[in-house]
Image: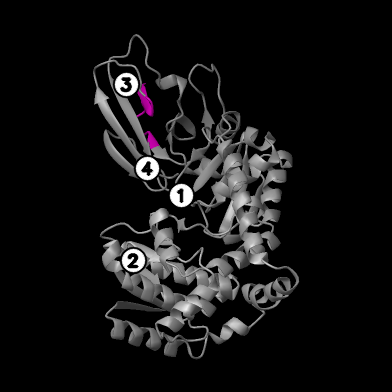
Amino acid sequence: MDEVLGFIKENQLIKPGEIIGVACSGGRDSICLLHFLNSIKSELDCEVVAVNVDHGIRVHSALDTEFVAQFCKEHGIRFYKFKAEALKVAKEEKLTIEQAARKVRYGMFETLIKKGLADKIALAHHMQDQVETILLNIIRGAGLSGARGMEPVRDKIYIRPLLNTPREKIMSYLDEHGLEYVDDETNKDNTYSRNYIRNIVLPDLRKQFKGVDRSIIHFSEICKIDDAYINSQIDLGTMIDGKNEVKLPLGYFYQDKAIVNRILRQVFSKFTKQDIERKHIEMVHHFALEANNGSVINLPMKISVMKEYDYITIGYFKKKEIVGNYPFRSGKLKIVGYGTIRSTASKVKTEPKIHQHIVDADRLPTNAVWRFREEGDVFSPLGLGGSKKLKDYFIDKKIPQRMRNSIPVMADGHKILAVADIEIADEIKVTDETRAYYKINYEKDYI
């Protein structure tokens, strides 16, 4: 296993002082990885712990957990076990059992990391797993990015020390050290996509084509080089990255399709660890070019895509029911669903800064309130010389429809005096006769 140690060092998978949690099901691959890393922990100056997740799918899964616990006890390895309900998650979230199992498994791993019980999670994927992943990704239409297969490191947390190791070497290592392991009976269930590839497709390919595994790996390495070059041509400088959404200028979608596809995959990776399907990428591309303003489509994982004037917005959108009147006053005002408005009285005239309005304090009605828009609201924007419906003003300013109910307005009845962080009414503007001012600062937290 000298090659594995070399692979770890070459890819800097483990740094001195780190705690490495080895995901161990009790199967041959994970037992091999756990035993090997534990045997070289002194050389790597790291600590090795075992992590077992019982997905609650199989009848005998609890026995496998006990097997791993006993193995750890015999070898002096700290052991963490988790119990999950993948079948329940699959039903509630309309996922396949494979998707649900992956979701709960990685959720447990992240919990371990957040609690500081591990710095990284070592996964026992080997060369044949890589081949299976590449074929599955190609079948799913993932393109070059999927054909690259798995990386030695993902998200700076998940490492794959055995990724270049053939299964035969793993079996030799187990025999050499007399290590026992458990067999997962679901590995023979070919209704699972990966098992179908592993048990039916690849054995037939190996009979017909000598060295097919190495050829597929070589293909993935070529794809990795080409994909890296294309990705280097992407410029996301004008993308607006918000808390729960990403806004892409429509101009992005007129670029070469290879660039557009990668932009979308990169954006979707913000919202889901799962690869978005090719059909959804094409759907969004067509939507951006052809859909009417205000249109929306819903994708898996509760992701929505909306066309908003010159942008395509991707993210999680929830309808906001925001109500309430807040009398205008000096000081700090926290408005649920928007953020903070700070109003400060002043006798000193200054030029307004970004996210700030300055108004004539003497021209503000005493009954002015902050609220959200209502039917019948009218607005006379600064310098317009006339009034218009607030709805028309929002349209003229290209304010997305879903955001209009979330923007506070200062009002006197149905007369709008200010639209928060956007514009003030002409009647409260500062003039040469102004002697008292209100400086109004806006701090938004709703995007």
Q: Quadrant of residue 180?
A: bottom left
Asked if the residues shown at circle 4 and circle 1 are in contact, with their CB atoms under 8 angstroms apart, the answer is no
Label 2 or label 1, whichever comes before in sequence order:
2
- Spatial separation of the CA atoms under disc 2 and disc 4: 41 Å
Q: Nearer the viewer, mark 4 or mark 1?
A: 4
Queried whether the magenta region covers residue 359, the answer comes back as yes
Of the image marks 1 and 3, the number of the one nearer the N terminus:
1
Looking at numbered disc 1 in the image, what kind of residue is underneath it?
Answer: Ile
Q: Which residue is at 35% across, 59% downward?
A: 14
Query: Label 3 amino acid?
Result: Asp
The amino acid pointed to by label 4 is: Gly
Mark 3 vs mark 2, CA separation in Å: 66 Å
Q: Element type at marker 3?
A: helix
**Which mark is first along the chain, 4 or 2?**
2
Q: Is 76 above or below relative to 142? A: below
Distance Cα–Cα, label 4 vs label 1: 12 Å
Q: Residues within 10 Å of mark 3 (few under 14, many from 20)?
A: some
Residue tagged by mark 4?
Answer: 339
Calculate the distance from the C-alpha at mark 1 to the C-alpha at mark 3. Answer: 30 Å
Q: From mark 2 to mark 1, how far is it between C-alphas?
A: 47 Å
Position of 292 with respect to 361 (left or right) is right
Tell me which label, 3 or 4, sits earlier in the chain: 4
340 relative to 376 in the view: left or right: left
The stretch of residues the image draws in magenta is 354-369
- Which residue has dot 1 on it? 322
The x and y percentages for residue 183 are 52, 86
Residue at the disc numbered 2? 20
User: In front: mark 1 or mark 3?
Assistant: 1
Residue beneath label 3, please? 362
